[in-house]
Amino acid sequence: MSRRIRTWLENNLISRDRLRGERIHKMLGERLFAREIWHIDRYTISGGLALGLFVAFTPTIPFQMIIAAFCALWLRVNLPVALAACWITNPLTIIFFYKMAYNIGYHSLGKLPWIFSGLVEKEQLGIRDIFTKAVYLWTGGMLLGSVAALAGYGFVRIAWYLASRKEKK
């Protein structure tokens, strides 16, 4: 990888040393300082980006960073990149992405009243509509997140390969 990119990432990402002794360190312990979570290489960066993009497109907006942080610790991918990737969906862009996820879910599943017909009675049709829309949103979010994660993972791996190949010449 290009030295300039590596230097920029090392200078601008959260460092392990700043977190030592903080509340988060007391909660998670030494696992927070695992080498893989902070190391900059093609595996951890691409994994962190894929994780962050996947979580970003799921309809979990108030909890996305928490989910991404715990998953990054569990999967041992780059934590700062995973957290930064969650911010692709922010309060300004979330309406657009949720609408797109809903439409993708709706078109991929079609009509769903048969799933919830036994759950609610005829008087509670509003609840069935809410559940149906939630299924569309979650399905579309998972599909959109999967595509974004695969694209982000592939992009980082290809870009890293091309940068390292250019450096060798």
Image (spheres, rainbow, N blue to C red):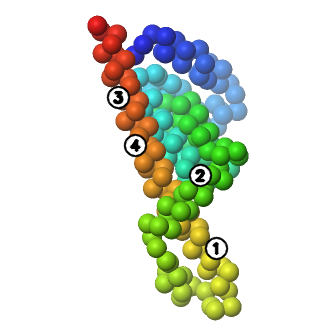
Residue 70 location, quadrant? top right
| Mark 3 surroundings within 10 Å by alpha-carbon count, few (fewer than 14), some (14 through 19), many (20 or more) | some
Q: Residue at x 49, y 15 (%)?
A: 5
**What residue is pinned by disc 3?**
158
Vertical position of residue 46 compared to residue 124: above or below: above
Q: Amino acid at mark 3?
A: Ile
Numbered tag placed on residue 89 in the rendering = none
Q: Which mark is residue 150?
A: 4
Return the disc, 2 or 1, that comes first in the chain's sequence.
2
Which residue lies under the disc numbered 1? 130
Q: Amino acid at mark 2?
A: Phe
Point out which mark residue 97 bears. Answer: 2
* Label 4 or label 1, whichever comes before in sequence order: 1
Residues at badges 4 and 1 in contact (C-beta under 8 Å)? Answer: no
Q: Nearer the viewer, residue 167 or 36?
A: 167
Q: Give coordinates of residue 32: x percent, y percent.
A: 55, 31
> Helix, strand or loop at disc 3?
helix
Q: CA distance from mark 4 to mark 3?
A: 12 Å
